[in-house]
Amino acid sequence: MRRHARTLLETGKVRISSLATITMIAGYVLARGEVTWPLAAVTVGVFLVAFGSSGLNQIQERDVDAIMERTCGRPLPSRRSSLTYAVAVSVLCLVSGALVVLAGSNAAAMGLALAAAAWYNGVYTPLKRVTAFAAVFGGVVGAIPPVIGWVAGGGWALDARILAVAFFFFMWQVPHFWLFLLSSCGEDYEKAGLPSMTRTFSSEQISRITFMWIIGTAAACLMMPLFGVIDEPWVNVGFLAAGVWIVWRSVRILHASCGDTGFQHAFKRINQYACIVVSLLSLAGLLR
């Protein structure tokens, strides 16, 4: 049972699915200013949609995963899971998750959840075989969950406040992926025949591009108060302190070589930065 549960969790990339769910919760709290019972249903539903979409992603990429050292141990390439089982679980989670979101909130939230899955599996995943800049398009997937939460909480999807939050997560997702690529030197991608930035640019050039994107991410965070997302001075101070911290700690990547531990540390810090921002947003929403 333990082995079966582990295989199931790996199929749905539980960490990625959890991250999408957390940012959705932040959007909901910002819209409602409180935690209500319907949030429980939306949380379960969004997690299931993300879980099912991640499972479909592994089905789509099973041939490439079998070649790359980092992913060859995943359930499908390692044959710990059958294709039929993976398809059944993924589709079941996707459909049931969408229905749970609908039951707990509204059709708009369900539509956004399905749109995120469609973009992830129908646009981003195929683009990874076409361009090394697929991560830029993939950033859209990270931008949608907080909007789902906002709409589920009664907000309007095109409200400038939540669009500012979504833009931050779009910006964050790109250096998140590129730092991961640099930490492994992109060798797996090249081995699998996938377009990789390491084939187009030197590690120094990628480092500079990534560093500038990190600065842009910090700037996107500082812009959120300008759109009326929050009006608490202590949150603004927190955003500023976190932005200065992530930029300062990321300077090291400008002098790092491909595969250097500096990129691994920067990858962890960019994730910690996102957690800090989500925490500040959620706390501000609850205390206003």
Image (spheres, helix red, strand yellow):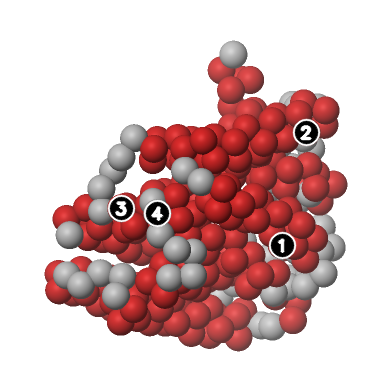
User: What is the number of callouts on the image?
Assistant: 4
Looking at the image, do the residues carrying marks 2 and 1 touch, with CB atoms under 8 Å apart? no
Residue on which disc 3 sits: 32
> Could you tell which of marks 4 and 1 lies nearer the N-terminus?
1
Looking at the image, do the residues carrying marks 3 and 4 touch, with CB atoms under 8 Å apart? yes
Amino acid type shown at disc 4: Gly
Amino acid type shown at disc 2: Val
The nearer-to-camera label among 2 and 3 is 3
Helix, strand or loop at mark 3: helix
Q: How many residues crowd around disc 2 within 10 Å: few (fewer than 14), some, or many (20 or more)?
A: some
> Could you tell which of marks 2 and 1 lies nearer the N-terminus?
2
Q: How many residues crowd around disc 1 within 10 Å: few (fewer than 14), some, or many (20 or more)?
A: many
Which labelled disc corresponds to residue 87?
A: 2
Q: Quadrant of residue 138?
A: bottom right
Q: What percent of the width, then of the height, locates residue 7?
A: 64, 28
Which labelled disc corresponds to residue 124?
A: 1
Helix, strand or loop at mark 2: helix
Which labelled disc corresponds to residue 142?
A: none
Q: How far is disc 3 from disc 4 in space, using C-alphas?
A: 7 Å
Q: How far is disc 3 from disc 1 in space, using C-alphas?
A: 31 Å
Q: What percent of the width, then of the height, locates residue 82?
A: 81, 27
The nearer-to-camera label among 3 and 1 is 3
Identify the residue at horizontal 48%, vertical 84% (top origin): 212
